[in-house]
Amino acid sequence: MCEMKGFLTFLVLRLIKKKSSSGEDIRQELEKRKGCKPSAGTIYPVLKYLKESTLIEETSDGAKEKKYSLTEKGKKELEVATRKFMKMFADVFEEN
């Protein structure tokens, strides 16, 4: 079983920041990075939530697949989330 739900929103935002991506692009990239491919039923609700929260928007490149990119609000939210993530886990790395 692929356990990623805790940080999935954060991971999806980080991947979309690097390049506009479709849901399938994100699934494949997570499989490469994490060793398991999350189901469409896991990824697409996250994309829907992020879109409804105006953190991402659909972009058109002429292809059939919907691609998503970060909005300005999404970029700011990702910066805040990254700082929180780093602060939360900084002590884990300092213990070594």
Image: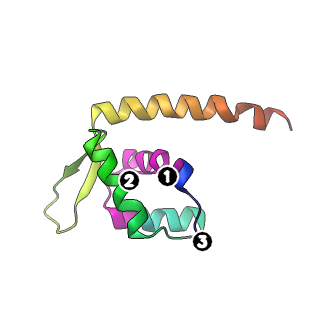
Q: Secondary structure at mark 3?
A: loop
Quadrant in the picture for residue 32: bottom right
Quarter where residue 55 is shown: top left
Whole-percent x and y of residue 77? Answer: 40, 31
Give the magenta part as a residue range: 7-25
Residue at which label 2 appears = 46
Q: Mark 3 is on which residue type?
A: Met
Identify whether 62 is placed above or below 6.
Answer: below
Q: Position of residue 29 (x, y in %)?
A: 47, 63
Q: Which mark is residue 38?
A: none
Pick the front one: 60 or 53: 53
- Residue 4 or 59: which is nearer the viewer? 4
Label 1 belongs to which residue? 8
Residue at x-position 26% and y-position 38%: 54
Identify the mark nearer the N-term, 1 or 2.
1
What colour-coding does the image apply?
Answer: rainbow
Q: Are marks 1 and 2 in contact (CB under 8 Å)?
A: yes
Circle 2: residue type: Val
Q: Is 30 colored magenta in this rendering?
A: no
Give SS at disc 1: helix
- Please identify the quarter of the rendering in which residue 92 is found: top right
